[in-house]
Amino acid sequence: MAGGIRTFVALDLPESHRETLAAHLVECARLAPAYRWAEPDALHLTLRFIGHQEPAVLDAVRGGLAAIRARPFRLALTGRGTFGPRASPRVVWLGAGEGVDRCTDLAAMSDGACQAAGLEPDARGFRAHVTLARARREGQRLGDLPEPPALAPWTVEDFVLYESRLQQRPRYVPLDRYPLTG
């Protein structure tokens, strides 16, 4: 669909984590320029990609998301991983450790809200991760990278419906925040 608003549901990272990861991302970009490394302010953990939707559909999704009831939970990011071939992955990410089950539950509830609004189920399946980089072209070698910095667990208190604006700054604009109040 060419029109509509491109959106996704995600968890934010604490600002302190973005700041801690900033220098790491700069160093990784220096060592692996064939990859497009995320800007710290764009880091998030996607629960459900929605894509381009017309306002009426998006309003139904918003209503479903607002009806989600879940308690706040602790979340920790652990080691780095990749999607794709080991030597030339498509994506470099940080995975979720503590709290991964709660992320999975929240992703399923978000997907349910989208389905109730008439969208197809998320066909990709959910893997709790924060994308750090994407290969600029398929088959790019990654090479050795420094270990990511240690990040303290934090309490997730809400989730966010974001608009994704391609080729613009800011790239991700929060449309709605949904508190986790149980």
Image (spheres, grey):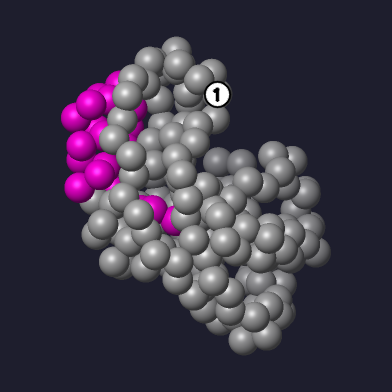
Direction from residue 102 to residue 86 in the image, left or right? left
Amino acid tagged 1: Gly
Picture layout, residue 101 above or below residue 136: below
Figure quadrant of the C terminus: bottom right
Q: Which residues are magenta?
A: 23-44
- Quadrant in the picture for residue 123: top right
| Residue drawn at 62 percent across, 54 percent down | 48
| Residue drawn at 38 percent across, 15 percent down | 141
Direction from residue 62 to residue 140 in the image, left or right? left
Q: Residue furthest bottom?
A: 181
Q: Does residue 129 appear in this view?
A: yes
Direction from residue 36 to residue 64 in the image, left or right? right
| Residue drawn at 77 percent across, 62 percent down | 112
Q: Is residue 26 magenta?
A: yes
Picture layout, residue 137 above or below residue 180: above
**Position of residue 99 measured from the top left corner of the image (x, y, whole percent):** 60, 64
Q: Does residue 114 appear in this view?
A: no
Name the residue carrying label 1.
Answer: 84
**Position of residue 120 measured from the top left corner of the image (x, y, whole percent):** 77, 48
Mark 1: which secondary structure? loop
